[in-house]
Image: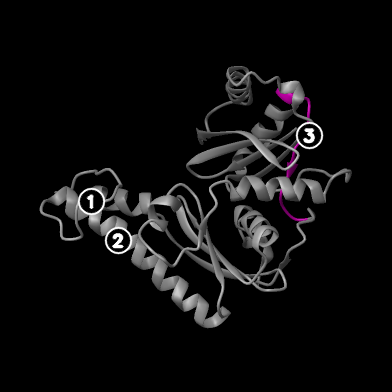
Amino acid sequence: MILTCNVGNTNIKLGLFAGETLVRDWRLTTDSARTADERGLLWRRLFLDAGLATTTVKAAVICSVVPPLQSSLEETCRRYFGLEPLFVGPGVKTGLSIRVDNPGEVGTDRIVNAVAGFELYGGPLVIVDLGTATTFGAVSQRGEFLGGAIAPGIGIAAEALFRWASKLPRVEICRPPAVIGKNTVHSMQAGILYGAVGLVEGILARMKEELGPARVIATGGFAGMIAAETAAIDRVEPFLTLTGLRIIYERNRGVRRQTCG
């Protein structure tokens, strides 16, 4: 089996694949202070609770937007799985042509999403990742990553309201009874949710003016919530990044590499 690991600023998503089938997935908090042993013991516990043995894992592939965690993740894979993980980065074959000014600046999660999206749906397409940040990635009909847009995520926007507006409370991010809120909590929920919907619709409309008609795929923790409020998103793929990691591993199978960030 292949262990896939997507390290984000807020969460670490793990996926275990048998061939092309996602057998199990887990979502953990990203904790930069956690040691390799603490992380390894936690991951082993997850496997045990699922009735799985760590020895079933024959390969590991990781993409991370938190560079300080790389050495710790490497050590976790070595000690608890007996593996040298493949880190997605420069020198790793993705099958995707990256047409931006500085390819090294592009988050590896965005590239992995583009790989999976193009493999599943072809192009042109736009991938919206609704996580800590809200990112948009455009992929051409020929499988070129053309760039995109990056905006504050829904959680960041909600937290900013609480932190910087002294009379506003911290609220649950959910669908309010109406857009016209009758109290502060509902008003904030309406502004946060429908503001995010408007941002997604507006940026997608402008990107399609440049790209032409394109399929829109959404992923990330808030993808389902936003997709339920707009017709601009064609499909939600909650495991898009994990799928992309599995595809990239297959494209690099048998190639011995040093890890790269």
Q: Position of residue 237 (x, y in %)?
A: 55, 52
Q: Is residue 44 left or right of residue 162?
A: right
Q: At numbered mark 3, what does the secondary structure look like: helix, strand or loop?
A: loop
- In terms of image quadrants, where is residue 80? top right
Task: Estimate how packed mark 1 is, as few (under 14), some (14 to 19) or many (20 or more) residues with alpha carbons within 10 Å.
Answer: many
> Is the Cβ of the residue at disc 2 closer than 8 Å to that at disc 1?
no
Q: Decide: few, some or many residues near mark 3? Use Cα within 10 Å; few <14, some 14-19, many ≥20.
A: many
In front: 130, or 99? Answer: 130
Is 89 inside the magenta-drawn segment?
A: yes
Q: Amino acid at mark 3?
A: Glu
Quarter-of-image position of residue 98: bottom right
Left or right: 34 in relation to 2: left
- What is the x, y in percent for residue 212? 56, 80
Q: CA distance from mark 2 to mark 1?
A: 10 Å
In the image, which is nearer the foreground, mark 2 or mark 3? 2
Classify mark 1: helix, strand or loop.
Answer: loop
Tell me what residue is drawn at x 63 percent, y 72 percent.
124
Q: Quadrant of residue 48?
A: top right
- Name the N-terminal-most of marks 1 and 3: 3
Q: Which residue is mark 3?
A: 84
Q: Which residue is mark 2?
A: 194
Give the side of residue 146 with respect to residue 97, left or right: left
Residues tagged 2 and 3 counted as in contact (Cβ below 8 A)? no
Q: Is residue 8 visible?
A: yes
Residue placed most toward the observer, 239 or 101:
239
The three-letter code of the residue at mark 1 reads Pro
Name the residue that disc number 1 marks.
176
Measure the C-alpha gap from mark 2 to mark 3.
44 Å
- What amino acid does circle 2 point to? Tyr
Part of the protein shown in magenta: 79-90
Residue at 36% x, 62% y is 197
